[in-house]
């Protein structure tokens, strides 16, 4: 039974002094607060202001602050695994807000999958809808042209077996992460959960559920969001399973760039087909969401596909990790 199982909650913060209090307070409000054995917060090259905001919760949470002077996502996650003392590790981030039933729901999923010996379970994440572009981003990933069935953005209708679980909303077996070799220290600032997923799947399945939903304020502007997509595309080629890891959203964007290389009179035909496809998909989202803003999605999808595709091409040509 999992009603007595203790869980290590792992958090990483970087430049989140205005948000760290929100995630820590949402942990205080967990329905199964008594099952949080420890909260390991890695000060991932962050400033003293963030640390001071976190220290307020030392009496409210079993909080342990781990200093890490260099901002490096792979090393910070590996530090949490090495320091964890509980059999299960729940991951989220300093720019997230989790619902009160977050940990309880993840534990219920874990219990339901116990016969399958999972390596991990998790849920989706969405941006807070405090700006128009964030609302449009959430709308865009409601369609496969926006999420490409990648666990990073996909919200399945039912339990789905996936290649990896984003560490913004995940529950893992501590033993299996260590058995798989822990998070790779080669990955920064993205891709560490993707690469670990392929190694974890060899030890047990990974499942993505429609709930719990975590609010993840991962970008302060739409440009930062496009930069993030570029990095996700770039990092694919660092993974030995890169061809399997490529999101579907790479395909239409890559076709667009191929079309630009044609010198024949009919070079525009692939582009016309591509944008027609985007428009039809936007009308589908409009029908389902009844939001007039869905008509702007072709433009959003085009920018997302282009950023991701450029990242994939860059990663293929350079075979280097993106730097922050």
Image (cartoon, grey):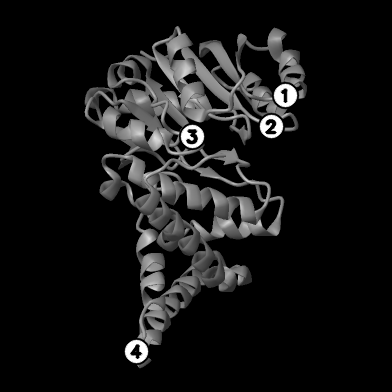
Question: Label 4 to label 1, Cα distance in Å?
Answer: 55 Å
Upstream in sequence: badge 1 or badge 2: 2
Mark 3, Cα crowd under 10 Å, few <14 / some 14-19 / many 20+, is some
Tell me the tag on residue 47.
Answer: 1
What residue would you read off at disc 2?
15
Q: How many marks?
A: 4
Residue at 48 percent across and 38 percent down: it is 190
Say which residue appears at 46% left-offset and 62% top-offset. 305
Q: Is residue 209 visible?
A: yes
Badge 2 marks a residue whose secondary structure is: loop
**Label 4: few (<14), some (14–19) or many (≥20) C-alpha neighbours in 10 Å:** few
Q: Is residue 169 above or below residue 87?
A: below
Q: Counting residues from the N terminus, which is met first, the one under dot 4 or under dot 1?
A: 1
Choose top left, top right, bottom left or bottom right for residue 55. Answer: top right
Per the image, the residue denoted by label 4 is 264
Are the residues tagged 2 and 4 within 8 Å (C-beta)? no
**Between 122 and 306, which is closer to the camera in this rendering?**
306
Q: How far apart are marks 1 and 3 (CA)?
A: 19 Å
Seen from this angle, which residue lies furthest front?
Answer: 318
- The residue pinned by badge 3 equals 188
Cα gap from disc 2 to disc 4, whole angstroms: 49 Å
Rendered position, 210 above or below 44: below
Closer to viewer: mark 3 or mark 4? 4
| Secondary structure of the residue carrying numbered label 1 | loop
Distance from the alpha carbon under mark 3 to that under mark 4: 41 Å
Q: Are marks 1 and 3 in contact (CB under 8 Å)?
A: no
């Amino acid at each position: 039974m999992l009603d007595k199982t203790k869980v290590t909650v792992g958090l990483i913060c970087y430049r989140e002094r205005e948000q760290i209090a929100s995630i820590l307070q949402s942990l205080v409000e967990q329905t199964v607060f008594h099952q949080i054995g420890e909260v390991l917060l890695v000060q991932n090259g962050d400033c003293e202001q963030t640390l001071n905001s976190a220290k307020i919760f030392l009496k409210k949470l079993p909080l342990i602050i781990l200093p890490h002077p260099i901002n490096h996502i792979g090393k910070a996650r590996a530090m949490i695994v090495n320091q964890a003392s509980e059999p299960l590790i729940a991951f989220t981030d300093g720019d997230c807000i989790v619902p009160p039933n977050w940990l309880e729901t993840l534990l219920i999923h874990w219990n339901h999958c116990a016969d399958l010996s999972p390596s991990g379970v998790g849920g989706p994440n969405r941006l807070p809808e405090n700006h128009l572009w964030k609302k449009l981003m959430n709308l865009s990933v409601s369609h496969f042209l926006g999420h490409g069935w990648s666990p990073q953005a996909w919200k399945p209708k039912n339990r789905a077996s996936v290649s990896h679980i984003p560490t913004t909303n995940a529950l893992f077996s501590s033993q299996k992460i260590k058995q798989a070799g822990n998070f790779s220290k080669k990955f920064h600032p993205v891709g560490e959960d993707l690469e670990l997923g392929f190694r974890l799947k060899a030890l047990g399945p990974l499942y993505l559920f429609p709930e719990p939903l975590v609010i993840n304020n991962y970008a302060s502007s739409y440009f930062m969001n496009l930069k993030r997509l570029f990095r996700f595309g770039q990092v694919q080629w660092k993974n030995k399973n890169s061809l399997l890891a490529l999101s579907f959203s790479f395909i239409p964007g890559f076709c667009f760039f191929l079309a630009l290389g044609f010198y024949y009179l009919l070079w525009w035909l692939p582009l016309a087909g591509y944008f027609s496809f985007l428009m039809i998909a936007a009308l589908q989202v409009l029908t389902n969401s009844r939001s007039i803003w869905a008509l702007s999605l072709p433009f959003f999808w085009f920018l997302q596909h282009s950023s991701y595709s450029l990242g994939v091409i860059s990663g293929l040509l350079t075979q280097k990790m993106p730097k922050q």
